[in-house]
Image (tube, rainbow, N blue to C red):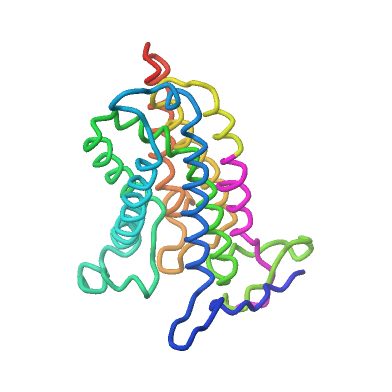
C-alpha cells in the first residue's frame, strides 16, 4: 500500500506571489501544444496547402489563444451546468469564482469547439480541417492536467483491493484505506496512450473529419473506462444504470465520434 506524497501545491513563493504546480502544468500543456502543432504543419494535408489558405505559426498562436479562452470559459460553464446547475442558478455570481475550483473537461471541449469555429470562420477554412489539425496535439495537455491533479491529491479513485500493489492512501479523502490512483490511470490512457494512437493515425493523410472523430471516440472510451476507478463527485454519486456523470457525458461524445468518422469516411475529398 502506497501513501500519496504530501506535496506542497505551491511550487515557488516570491513574496506575495505564489506559483502553483497546477498552474505550471497548464503552462506545460500549452507549451506541448505549440510544439506539437508546429510539427503538424509538416503533415499532410497542411504541408501541401499553399496560397492564401497556407498554414503558419501565426495560425498556431491564434488557435492556442482562442483555445485557452474556450477551455477556461467552457470548462467553468460546463461544470456549473453539468454538475451543479441548481446551486449556480441560485448563486449566479459564484460562476465567476473560478479560484474556488470546478472545471469540466466536456464543457472545456465545447468551448474549444466554439472558439475554433470562430477561428475557422475568420480564416475562411473548413472547421473540421482546423479540428483535425489540433486533435492530435490535445492529449499531452490532458496528461499534464492529470499530473496537476495528482500533485494536488484531488480526483482520487474508488477504494481498491487491500492487496493491490499500487493502491494508494489519499489523506485528503478522509479515509486511510487504499484507493485507485485514478489520476495516473487517466494520465496513461487519456494522455499518453491516446496521444500515441492519435498521432500515428494522423501522420497519414485522412479524410477531413476522421481524425476528429477518432479523438472523440478515443477520449470517450478511455474516460469511460477510467470512471469505473474514479470516485464519483460526492454531491452526485452514481447515477442511472450505475454510471457516473463523467460516463454519461462520454456516451454522446462516443456516439458523435463514431458518426463523424463514418460520415467522413464516405467523403471523396481529403481536405
74 relative position to 158: left or right: left
Q: Quadrant of the image for the N terminus?
A: bottom right
State the image coordinates of residue 142 (x, y, percent, origin top left).
51, 52
Asked if residue 95 is positioned above or below residue 109 in the image, the reply reads below
State the image coordinates of residue 22 (x, y, percent, origin top left).
50, 68
Residue at 60% across / 53% down in the picture?
187
Front one among 77 and 57: 57
* Image quadrant assignment for residue 5: bottom right
| Extreme-bottom residue of the structure | 15
Residue at 52% across / 40% down in the picture?
221
Asked if residue 172 is positioned above or below residue 263 in the image, the reply reads below
Residue at 79% across / 61% down in the picture?
165
**From which residue to which does the magenta span run?**
174-195
State the image coordinates of residue 226 (x, y, percent, origin top left).
57, 51
* Image quadrant assignment for residue 118: top left
| Extreme-front residue of the structure | 51
State the image coordinates of residue 135 (x, y, percent, origin top left).
45, 38
Asked if residue 47 is positioned above or below residue 96 in the image, the reply reads above
Q: How many marks?
A: 0
Q: Is residue 193 magenta?
A: yes
Residue at 55% across / 44% down in the picture?
222
Q: Quadrant of the image for the C terminus?
A: top left
Front one among 200 and 227: 200
Magenta portion: prevailing SS class: helix
Asked if residue 200 is positioned above or below residue 101 in the image, the reply reads above
Q: Is residue 121 magenta?
A: no
69 relative position to 43: left or right: left
Amino acid at each position: 500500500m502506497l501513501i500519496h506524497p504530501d506535496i506542497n501545491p505551491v511550487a515557488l513563493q516570491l513574496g506575495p506571489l505564489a506559483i502553483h504546480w497546477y498552474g505550471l502544468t497548464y503552462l506545460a500543456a500549452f507549451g506541448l501544444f505549440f510544439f506539437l502543432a508546429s510539427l503538424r504543419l509538416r503533415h499532410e494535408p497542411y504541408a501541401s496547402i499553399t496560397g492564401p489558405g497556407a498554414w503558419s505559426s501565426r495560425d498556431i498562436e491564434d488557435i492556442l489563444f482562442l483555445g485557452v479562452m474556450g477551455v477556461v470559459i467552457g470548462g467553468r460553464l460546463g461544470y456549473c451546468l453539468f454538475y451543479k446547475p441548481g446551486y449556480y442558478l441560485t448563486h449566479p455570481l459564484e460562476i465567476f469564482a473560478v479560484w474556488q475550483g470546478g472545471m469540466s473537461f466536456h464543457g472545456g471541449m465545447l468551448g474549444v469547439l466554439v472558439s475554433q469555429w470562430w477561428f475557422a470562420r475568420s480564416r475562411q477554412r473548413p472547421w473540421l480541417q482546423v479540428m483535425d489539425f489540433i486533435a492530435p496535439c490535445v492529449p499531452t495537455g490532458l496528461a499534464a492536467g492529470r499530473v496537476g491533479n495528482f500533485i494536488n491529491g484531488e480526483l482520487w479513485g474508488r477504494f481498491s483491493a487491500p492487496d493491490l500493489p499500487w493502491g494508494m492512501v489519499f489523506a485528503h479523502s478522509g479515509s486511510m484505506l487504499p484507493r485507485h490512483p485514478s489520476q495516473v490511470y487517466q494520465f496513461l490512457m487519456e494522455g499518453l496512450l491516446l496521444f500515441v494512437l492519435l498521432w500515428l493515425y494522423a501522420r497519414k493523410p485522412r479524410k477531413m473529419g476522421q481524425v476528429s472523430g477518432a479523438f472523440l471516440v478515443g477520449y470517450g472510451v478511455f474516460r469511460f473506462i477510467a470512471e469505473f476507478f474514479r470516485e464519483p463527485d460526492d454531491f452526485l454519486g452514481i447515477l442511472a444504470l450505475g454510471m457516473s456523470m463523467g460516463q454519461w457525458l462520454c456516451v454522446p461524445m462516443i456516439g458523435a465520434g463514431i458518426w463523424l468518422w463514418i460520415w467522413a469516411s464516405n467523403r471523396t475529398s481529403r481536405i
